[in-house]
Image (tube, grey):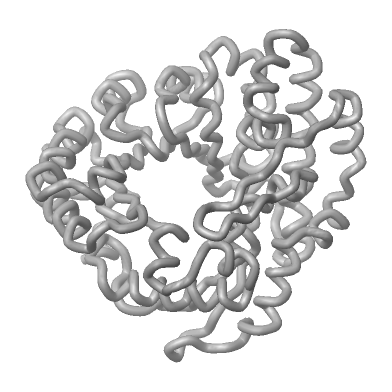
Amino acid sequence: MVERLWDDFENRRNERIPIVFACDEQFQLPLYGTTFGKYYRDPILMAEVQLQTTKWWMNNLVQDVRIGLPEDNWVVHPQLWMAEKEFFGCEVVYQENDYAWARPISARKEDLISMLQDIDPVERLKQNTGYRFYNIMKERFEGKDFCGIPIKVAPPNGIAGTHGIFTTATEVRGQDQICIDMAKDQEFVKSFLEIITEKTIERIKAWYQQTGEEKRFPSNEEWSMADDSLNILSPKLYEEFVLPFHERIYSEMTTGRRGIHLCGHAEQLFNVLYHKLRIRTFDGPGPWIDIGRMRDEFGTEVRVNAQVYHHKLRDGNSREIESMVHNILNDRAKRGGHMVLLGYAVAGTPVRNLEIMYRAGLKYGRILR
């Protein structure tokens, strides 16, 4: 049924909206019984947590993905959200009971530009935690089985991944400071974003080189990235400072479909992202976004991966969760059927609530054609 649903989805003939769930460490670690601090410091533990919790996830949740065991292989990887910031020279701060974070680099503007320009992507990768963890995992798990199925080791965040040009820039420079820079020194900001973009492209290509996986750039496959910090920008500021560098990385990565993940209130940018950056997959719009209006403005070719309120999914009762799903899956939003509904399980989300959301998605996700 799931295979048929996704095949129909890709060919725009699906009769209902697919419903999927996602989670990360904050859900996985209590399930396994360890802390953020231990997880981030031990690559063997990290891989074991991923294997055990992925197995649990695949066997205890009903959603529109394969249930049971993987068909081909398990995938484990260094789950280090700050790997990209470490690459750029930030100090990563590890906490025992929460996510790690990165300190902005405290340097004069000209010194910061010089530091970034001097980065040799291959050598910097080899110095970083993610690369060390990747090789330890390869040595320990590559070629081994779990539940009779082979284990594959992947780089941090996938090979061709980035948390975004502007998001990375805000974390390297500091969000407050880069806002001040945009007001007072536009040329520096543009030079800074240019070097962040070029080094991000070099980092992605360096990972392909180090893993031995052949890749031609640009590919004709869909390519997507996140850039959550865009939500602080107006369309004018986005066009002036960020759009040229987004165009640079997308053009380098793909000639195919372009996607972007945005959390929070970034709807002020949807128009320019669609018309000028040619984004055709929007990942992240939640109940605060009028998806029906997106359909009115951009048509049915745009794919929307819509999310529910994460904390309402955790804390809400059945009536509240069903009402939330009903409001998202209205007829205007579902028009054309190119939409997916995602529930993100934060720490403490009951499986029962995920089941309620799934049943509500089946109830309200039928498409009127």
Identify which residue, 207 or 233, lies in the foreground.
233
Image quarter of the C terminus:
top left
Q: In which quarter of the image is residue 26?
A: bottom left
**Residue 273 in view (yes/no):** yes
Q: In this view, does 136 lie to the left or right of 46?
A: right
Relative image position of residue 308 (x, y in whole percent): 27, 42
Residue 16 to residue 368: above or below: below
Whole-percent x, y for residue 68 in the image = 31, 78
Which quadrant would the N terminus be assigned to in this image? Answer: bottom left
Residue 110, by quadrant, is: top right
Q: In percent of the image, x 59 and y 13: which residue is there?
A: 237
Residue 366 percent location from the top left of the image: 12, 45
Residue nearest the observer in this picture, 90 or 344: 90
Is 129 placed left or right of 352 in the picture? right
On the rendered structure, is 283 left or right of 243?
left
Write the residue at 61% across / 64% down.
40
Give the number of callouts.
Answer: 0
Q: Is residue 164 above or below residue 33?
A: above
Q: Can you give x and y, in whole percent of width and height, for residue 236 in the image?
A: 56, 10
Q: Can residue 212 be seen in this view?
A: no
* Rendered residue at 32%/56% (across/down): 21
- Point 50% across, 37% down: residue: 260
Q: Specify the quadrant of the image occupied by residue 365.
A: top left
Please identify the residue farthest to the front as the structure is shown: 96
| Residue closest to the far bottom | 148
Of residues 331 and 151, which is closer to you in this image? 151
